[in-house]
Amino acid sequence: MKVLTLRDLSRVDSLHFSFAGAYDPRNGLKREVAPFLDALEESANGWMPTFVKSSRTRKYSRDAVWRAMEERRTEYGTIIGLVRSENPSVSLVLNLGPEDEQAMLWVSISVQPLSVFADVETCRGFVAAARAWTSLYPSDYAAAHSLADLSLAGAPSFGRDDATRRRDGFDKIYELCWLNVFGPKLVESVGRERMLSTPAHLVEELPNGAVLLVLRPTAADFDSDEARVAQARAHVHLRPDLDFDTVLRTLRERSAALVPVEPRFHPDVAPLLNRLPDEFGISERQQKIAELNAFRPPEPEEWLPAALPSDVENPERVLTSYGDLSEGLVAALHTKLPSIMDETPESLTDLDFYFWRENFPERYTRELIDSHTAPALGAYLGDVLVRRLGGTWVLRKKREESQVRVGKRVWLPFLRARRHMQSRQSLLDYSLTQFFREAERYRG
């Protein structure tokens, strides 16, 4: 079991909730955390965590939580994770800060997929949990909303630079989420009467002076036009200095950015491009798909209509050196890319994707790439052409002139590999996947 990583959270939209509330360490951590767990267990309808993570993973129980807290307790605080791996996935991080006069409890929850919160009862349970937690642990501000939309809004800074955010905190309502809890200071800055008259699904004053505001019965339809109008109307009510049309236009632009774009990738590089969108945050994924749909790699130029004659004196020695280069690549990467052992078209796509994801050409020195990586990649690419397309090597003293004959053309794998490794963009422009596809067309 694992806490969801940023990459996990980018694959499908999540409901994200976070807050920081005060707790009293003089009562002991167990006594302070128990009410948090009470509310979680009572309200987590369908998304209750099933495991506790600290130095080890245990099935969820109160005892497992106490043991995890003891294991992770330091002078700087205590951090544990409560997770759920089955659908819906849950990542809950509970962070109890240092036990001083300003002791704070930080909570961050992501429940995936967001579609779970299309159900009214599930949403009511989440609201109940948020109500209980922010009543128990007084907070300046708490919010639950689509993680994708929060990313587009620039959370947690909401368009402010970090220095301004640290200095001013939640000094005004920069953004309105599906669920909001405004602390007493923020309520007073808006005006309690004004806040309690906000047009929303639920507006409720909490015992500690905070106000709970929920825009709509469900969270999953946040990007519908009806929801955006309600969001803009409530935001402008709380911030009369804002212009309704401007706020609504911005919200509609964010909804448009999240509308699914159907992938229509160039067929020769589709096996590679299909893997790229998940590497971007969900808030920018549709834009990236549109950009990749428009991408047209240049036609491969690393070929000759007729072979240059071989000019090596000892072909076996040269082939052995190429084999050593290729085997070195396999030895270095086979644990990360098991397919590389098989010398297949799929292994070329795996290499393309690996080097792109690692941003290899820009992370490593040019000397390493030019003297080791690119030559090894060229030898491996040539071997795939030989093994999978029935090619034959035509060897030259100058390595980049060495060719593999496939059908009526000869191909220059070392030259392709050098161009491939020039930059992150060149990994797409000169992909190994496209090169193989082009050579395959001329096999017959």
Image: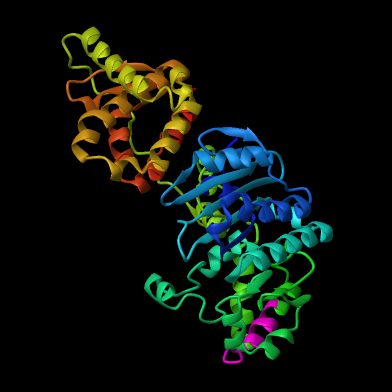
Residue 304 drawn at (x, y percent): 32, 31
Asked whether 48 falls inside the magenta stretch, the response is no
Q: Report the residue at 49% width, 62% height from top.
A: 103
The image position of residue 260, as x and y in percent, is: 65, 57
Q: Nearer the viewer, residue 339 or 4?
A: 4
In the image, is residue 234 above or below residue 377?
A: below
Name of the residue lying farthest toward the right: 121
Name the quadrant of the N terminus.
top right
In the rendered image, residue 242 lying in the magenta stretch gets the answer yes
- Above or below: residue 319 compared with residue 289: above
Q: Quadrant of residue 227?
A: bottom right
Q: How many marks?
A: 0
Residue placed furthest toward the front:
26
Q: At x 44% / y 27%, what residue is drawn? A: 336
Residue 203 at least partly seen:
yes
Measured along the vertical axis of the image, is residue 439 above or below residue 356?
Answer: above
- Stretch of the chain drawn in magenta: 231-243
Please name the colour scheme applied to the rendered image.
rainbow
x 41%, y 44%: residue: 428
Residue 190 position, x and y percent, is 61, 87
- Residue 415 position within the rendered picture, expressed as x and y whole percent measured from the top left: 28, 33
User: In the displayed structure, does residue 388 sit left or right of residue 11?
Assistant: left
Viewer-nearest residue: 258 or 274: 258
Examine the rendering and report whether any part of residue 422 can be seen: no
